[in-house]
């Protein structure tokens, strides 16, 4: 270790250089652990999609417990048997069968000693046997993980089955009962503790500072690649072809397995135009939500791969046609002049099915039998990196700052999903406790409320009451596909996340709606807290399971626009939706003309193009940096309260790039 070159800050003057290095090594390993826990669970989803149950069991400890609804099994071979039996012919192995299992919305808690972890997830399984049989099942996981010799493993997978049904009939609550609260492994107070403070001395490390610096760079790279992948998806949804193409490098390639390969930027645009021309027109839904993104960065830090699951939910309300597409993406990225760009898009459609016929008969796509190679996760991240002992001229302070930016990514994602899980249970008090002291939140169709107490009270006012013990219906708040931009100092972040809302009830088949969240999150007294939450809803809604999203009930044009939520008469917001002006104009309660699906609502972005830096533009597109009500309440801004405004362009702000 080259102490002479290290600028030791005042904070560390009491500790010896060795202790500082040991602590840094421990901190790096704890951030990596959070990622590895998510990776191992997402890998399970990737393998299950192709019926690779034997391989999937290697992600478990040898004596792992596996609980699926009312069935409990123990040990790898019993788990494999269960998976084979449970899926039957809907296993994703035989051509025409479907077993797309998405596991999303993680809240991960690492133990104090860093050797075990717990995580809560939402799950949905879309299954079919290609012979007319179909199945959908959804629920909540509360899982446990241990740090084994070679990598993190699942020690307990506990899936709580909440809803299920066939494609034709749709899903309803399991057992015809109300939906219970699935016990949480975390509290709102704890949910923002990025990583619990370790106890005792860090064990001695033989990693060099330059090795740790490299590992941190890989974490920072991973964040940028994940953001790029997710931002790419959001542009595709809106057919913003110019923005999509600008994320690509010049020598790019787009492959749609079994259908064609397109080269160069012109080729990329041509591939996109297969979905239609640039921009959305009335009645067009081009949503391609993406789930379970795994990112693998090459040890050289110049190339990366992202692999995950895409479920396209497309439709045209004009022709009343709609479809499902179950795709795997496996894209390559390249770093050019310090900026990550898309190099190869490889989309493999597994099943393409007419919404009104379902996927049970394997849809219309001709399967190619191609299996997009799985990524090599499941071992420790540090394993792939050279244990370089070169000198580093970085200061500890700067290295720690860069680590904090990646810890911020996970802390923000955690807080986002803690919100989603707790609001599903309509637990207003615990929801409010996720917010910072001076935070604000939008209540839909109403306005913004400031301070946790008023946020809780607005929740109670809008829902009428706390939830009953067993509500007969639930609208889930899935928040997948985050784009998280951390500030330079890693103490604040902005988050864009999709709201994908599967609903379920006792009596009526559930369905999907789609909206968008724009949040800010801060580190307050050592805990991540929500600072600003805005929901833009809805972009499209299903009028029922049978009718889907391409059959909206037409609005009577001579009826006046719907009024804001009635409860605000009793409990007025601090800022109404209308007072925010242009930014909320088209939403219910806003200052402009109400826009409702199948009309196209304006889509707002809080960041510029992550490669070109272009402000997103287009007919139904808007750009808004900073908190949504901040132009009418500048004193609510991050910067007015001692936090940095995170960058909103290429690379966010402040990543010191690999040279
Ligand atoms: C599984 O094995 C490990 C290591 O032998 C042990 O510590 C753990 O308690 C076992 N777990 C169960 C559920 O039996
Ligand atoms: C287990 O749950 C399934 C529904 O997920 C139900 O069909 C089955 O009857 C249950 N079995 C028992 C023994 O309760
Ligand atoms: C996420 O929240 C849990 C629940 O309290 C907490 O234990 C964990 O440390 C948090 N993790 C991150 C990465 O913020
Ligand atoms: C530390 O040294 C041990 C023993 O030589 C080795 O197994 C391990 O990989 C080393 N760790 C690092 C981070 O270099
Ligand atoms: C990409 O192509 C454009 C137009 O030919 C050129 O101006 C630009 O420098 C190229 N970019 C790179 C990174 O080579
Ligand atoms: C570490 O430094 C020594 C001496 O310069 C060199 O021989 C060795 O190859 C280096 N090891 C690595 C992994 O870079
Ligand atoms: C570290 O050293 C390299 C090469 O000498 C130099 O280019 C770079 O600017 C230095 N970085 C810092 C942070 O001082
Ligand atoms: C809602 O539940 C919380 C406990 O979670 C309780 O403190 C509060 O008094 C309840 N409020 C209402 C209006 O029932
Ligand atoms: C539309 O609304 C107007 C005004 O309320 C009403 O007179 C008319 O009957 C409605 N038309 C339909 C088709 O419901
Ligand atoms: C990033 O943010 C820091 C702190 O706000 C600021 O000092 C720096 O100039 C910014 N850098 C860039 C490239 O925007």
Image: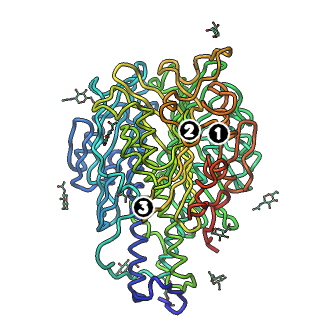
The residue carrying mark 3 is: 527
Mark 2 vs mark 3, CA separation in Å: 26 Å
Q: Quadrant of residue 494?
A: bottom right
Density class for disc 1 (Cα within 10 Å; few <14, some 14-19, many ≥20) is some
Q: Residue at x 46, y 26 (%)?
A: 511
Which residue carries the number 2 mark?
Answer: 447
Mark closer to the observer (2, 3): 2
Q: How is the image coloured?
A: rainbow
Q: Kindly indicate whether the residue at mark 3 contacts the one at mark 2 (C-beta within 8 angstroms).
A: no
Extreme residue toward the bottom, this view = 4
**Spatial CA span between label 1 and label 3:** 31 Å
The residue tagged with tag 1: helix, strand or loop?
helix
The residue wearing badge 1 is: 579
Within 10 Å of disc 3 (Cα), the crowding (few <14, some 14-19, many 20+) is many
Q: Residue at x 39, y 67 (%)?
A: 30
**Closer to viewer: mark 1 or mark 3:** 1
User: Is residue 560 found left or right of 476 in the rendered image?
Assistant: right
- The residue lying toward the viewer, choosing from 297 and 209, is 209
Q: Which SS class for mark 3?
A: strand
Q: Nearer the viewer, residue 201 or 90?
A: 201
In primary-sequence order, the first of circles 1 and 3 is: 3
Tell me which image quadrant ligand 8 sits in.
top left
Q: Name the spot of residue 25 as percent of width and height, x first.
A: 41, 76
Residue occupying image coordinates x 56% and y 40%: 516
Q: Is mark 1 within 8 Å of ligand 8?
A: no
Between discs 2 and 3, the one toward the N terminus:
2
Rendered position, 538 above or below 506: below
- Contact (CB < 8 A) between labels 2 and 1? yes
**Spatial distance from mark 2 to mark 1, Cα to Cα?**
9 Å
Is there a contact, CB below 8 Å, between mark 1 and mark 3? no
Marker count (numbered):
3
Q: From the viewer's side, name the closer residue of 335 and 89.
A: 335
């Amino acid at each position: 270790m080259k102490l002479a070159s290290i600028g030791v800050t005042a904070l560390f003057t009491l500790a010896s250089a060795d202790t500082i290095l040991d602590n840094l090594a421990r901190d790096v390993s704890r951030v990596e652990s959070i990622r590895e826990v998510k990776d191992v669970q997402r890998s399970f989803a990737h393998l299950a999609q192709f019926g690779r149950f034997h391989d999937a069991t290697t992600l478990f400890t040898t004596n792992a417990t596996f609980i699926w609804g009312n069935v409990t099994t123990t040990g790898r071979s019993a788990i494999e048997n269960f998976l084979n039996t449970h899926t039957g012919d809907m296993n994703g192995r035989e051509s025409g069968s479907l077993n797309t299992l998405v596991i999303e919305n993680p809240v991960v808690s690492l133990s104090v000693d860093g050797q075990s972890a717990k995580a809560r997830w939402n799950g949905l399984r879309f299954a079919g046997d290609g012979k007319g049989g179909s199945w959908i099942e959804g629920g909540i996981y509360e899982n446990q993980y241990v740090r084994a010799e070679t990598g993190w493993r699942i020690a307990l997978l506990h899936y709580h089955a909440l809803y299920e049904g066939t494609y034709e009939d749709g899903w309803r609550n399991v057992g015809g009962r109300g939906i219970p609260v699935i016990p949480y492994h975390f509290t709102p107070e704890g949910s923002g503790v990025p990583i619990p403070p370790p106890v005792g001395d860090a064990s001695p490390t033989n990693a060099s500072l330059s090795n740790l610096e490299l590992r941190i760079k890989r974490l920072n790279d991973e964040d940028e690649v994940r953001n790029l992948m997710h931002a790419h998806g959001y542009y595709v949804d809106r057919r913003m072809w110019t923005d999509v193409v600008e994320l690509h490098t010049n020598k790019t390639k787009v492959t749609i397995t079994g259908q064609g390969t397109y080269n160069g930027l012109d080729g990329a645009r041509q591939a996109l135009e297969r979905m239609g021309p640039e921009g959305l027109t009335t009645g067009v839904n081009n949503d391609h939500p993406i789930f379970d993104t795994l990112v693998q960065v090459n040890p050289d830090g110049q190339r990366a791969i992202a692999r995950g699951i895409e479920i396209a939910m497309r439709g045209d309300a004009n022709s009343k046609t709609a479809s499902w597409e179950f795709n795997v993406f496996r894209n390559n990225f390249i770093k050019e002049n310090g900026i990550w760009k898309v190099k190869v898009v490889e989309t493999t459609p597994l099943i393409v099915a007419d919404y009104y016929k379902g996927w049970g008969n394997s849809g219309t796509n001709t399967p190619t039998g191609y299996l997009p190679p799985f990524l090599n996760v499941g071992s420790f991240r540090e394993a792939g990196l050279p244990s370089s002992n070169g000198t580093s001229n970085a200061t500890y302070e700067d290295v720690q700052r860069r680590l904090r930016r990646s810890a911020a990514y996970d802390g923000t994602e955690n807080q986002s999903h803690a919100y989603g899980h707790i609001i599903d249970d309509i637990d207003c008090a615990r929801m409010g406790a996720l917010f910072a002291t001076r935070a604000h939140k939008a209540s839909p169709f109403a306005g913004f409320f400031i301070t946790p107490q008023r946020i809780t009270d607005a929740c109670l006012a809008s829902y009428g009451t706390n939830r009953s013990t067993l509500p007969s219906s639930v609208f889930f708040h899935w928040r997948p596909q985050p784009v998280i931009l951390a500030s330079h100092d890693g103490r604040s972040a902005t988050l864009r996340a999709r709201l994908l809302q599967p609903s379920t009830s006792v009596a009526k088949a559930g369905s999907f709606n789609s909206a968008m969240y724009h949040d800010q999150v801060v580190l307050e007294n050592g805990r991540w807290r929500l600072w600003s939450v805005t929901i833009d809803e809805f972009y499209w809604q299903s009028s029922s399971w049978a009718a889907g999203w391409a059959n909206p009930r037409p609005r009577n044009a001579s009826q006046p626009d719907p009024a804001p939520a009635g409860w605000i008469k009793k409990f007025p917001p601090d800022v109404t939706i209308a007072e925010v002006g242009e930014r909320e104009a088209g939403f219910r309660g806003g200052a402009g003309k109400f826009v409702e699906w199948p009309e196209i609502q304006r889509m707002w972005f809080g960041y510029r193009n992550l490669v070109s830096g272009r402000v997103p533009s287009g007919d139904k597109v808007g750009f808004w940096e900073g908190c949504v009500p901040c132009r009418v309440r500048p004193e609510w801004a991050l910067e007015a309260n001692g936090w940095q405004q995170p960058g909103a362009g290429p690379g966010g702000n402040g990543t010191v790039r690999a040279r």
